[in-house]
Every structure is written in structure tokens, then in C-alpha cells.
Image (cartoon, rainbow, N blue to C red):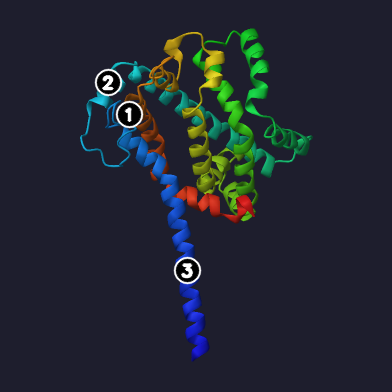
Amino acid sequence: MRNAIYFQTKKITINFLIHLFLLSMTLLCLYPLLWMIASSFKTQATIFSDISLIPKQLHFENYYLAVSQSDFGRYFLNSVFYTASVVFGIVIVSSLAAYAFSRLRFPGRNIIFTLFMAAMMIPIPGSFVALFVLLNKLHLRNTPLGYVLCMISVGLSMSIFLLKTFFDTMPRELEDAARIDGCSKLGIWRHMALPFAKPAIAVVVVFNALNVWNEYVLALIIFDSKNLMPLQRALMMFRGEFLTNYPLLMAGLTLTALPIIIVYLFMQKYIVKGVTSQTIFG
């Protein structure tokens, strides 16, 4: 009886400590986000003197000023277009390539796949010079198409790897049944492979959307026209040489974070399933 009570108490204590640690880490991760939202309702004079997460007075005009003073709407639509185009392109190209690497047999298949995996080890800034020269020769610099193509190439390697591991586990019996029903290889990819890989596709969508949405350095290199710049350009307008308007910057950052948070909430169940799946990481 004493042993049962001892082990039960030990189990409860360990679970309590584990949950306490996880809760502490959650609060530690959420605090910067909550501070950013709270700061967006403060003034320049109180943003650092009032450290509470609930401002004494809410200044909603910060959001109006953030949107109206920095061409926020134009840059926001630019980022929406770039993100949607890049994510759509990556999902289509990487899923086709991953399905080919997983199911088709052709000369040089392993070598080409290894080259894609090796590209993951090259840091993105290391390719800036090559991309700049290539886009100049193709007359695609300072164009949305050039930027979209560059960002698609940046996200392909990881996306192909994730999707290929899912396609490798797809039962071949399903493909045989689809062929008997008259499906072509493209038909199998569309009607079977893509639905089967929904968890991996959700991970690909969120990771690449976050990457494109927050990208700024490559856009500075590719674009000469300010009208083509992504949303991060609007945020830089709140930073002066001698003074930074922090409340407007926090309001802009809050508005910038909302779309990615919404995308994550819609795809949460697929993302959790994809990340915890042994077919990806095990």
C-alpha cells in the first residue's frame, strides 16, 4: 500500500513539474508578443515607463497612424501577393518533384536529389551575388516575377525533402487501384498524393509563408522601386536616424503578425500532425 502511494505521489509530482516547466516556457515565449501588443496602445512617453501589459489608457490612433503614414496598405498588398505566389509555386513544384523522386525511376535521380539536399546547407546570403547577376542577365531584377522566382528557389529544397518522406510511405496498392481506374501519373499526384500529404503540405505552407512574409534583405537587393517593396519596408519607416517611434512600430508589427497567426490557427491540426509524424522526423 505504501509503495502504491509513493509511486502515485511521485507520478503526480513529476507531472506537476513537467507541466510547470512547459507553462513557464509558454509564458516566456508569449511575453514578447503580449508586450508588443500592449506597447502598440501606449505613447512614446509611456512605452518604457509603463511596463504593465495592460495600459492605463488605450491609444487606438496608433494603428490609424501606422497605416496612414507609411503607405502600409500598398506594402501589405505587395507582401500578400508575394507570399501567396511563392507558397503556391513552392507547393506545386516541390510536390511534383517530390512525387517524381519518390515514385519514378530515372537516370541520375539520387544525384539530383542529393544536390537539392546539399542546397539546404548553403546560407541564403551566400547566394545573393549569384542571384543578382542572374536576374540582371534575365532582365528580371526590379520585377515582382524575379523576386517570386528567387523566393521559390529558396524554399524548394526543404519542401521537397518533407514531401518526399510522406510520398515514400504512401501505399502502392492505392496507386495500383488508381491506375486500374484509368488515372495517369498526374492524376495520381493530384487525387491521391496531395490529399495524402496534407500534414506535410501544411508545414510547407506555414514555414514558407513565414519566410516570405518576413523577408526584407533580398527585396532590398532585387528591387529599386520602393513601390514594389514588401511590408517590412513600411516598418522601417518608423525608425529614424535619431528617434524611433516605438508605439507606431509596435502597431505595425502587430498588424504584420496577424496574417501569419491566422494562417497557423487554420492549419494547426495539420501542422501538429505533420511535425509529430515519424514519417518526417523518424
Q: Position of residue 87 (x, y in %)?
A: 50, 31
Q: CA distance from mark 3 to mark 1?
A: 39 Å
Determine which of the numbered discs, if any, sits on residue 65 in the image. Answer: 2
> What residue do we see at 66% from left, 29% from top?
123
Q: Horizontal placement of 262 versus 182: left or right?
A: left
Determine which of the numbered discs, if any, sits on residue 102 in the image. Answer: none
Q: Position of residue 52 (x, y in %)?
A: 30, 41
Q: Looking at the image, do the residues carrying marks 1 and 2 touch, with CB atoms under 8 Å apart?
A: yes
Image height of 168 relative to 225, above or below: below
Report which residue position mark 3 lands on. Answer: 15
Kind of residue indicated by mark 3: Asn
> What residue do we see at 51% from left, 22% from top?
216
Q: CA distance from mark 2 to mark 3?
A: 48 Å
Report which residue position mark 1 lands on. Answer: 251
**Among numbered discs 3 and 1, the one appearing first in the sequence:** 3
Q: Looking at this view, name the residue that lies furthest to the left.
A: 57
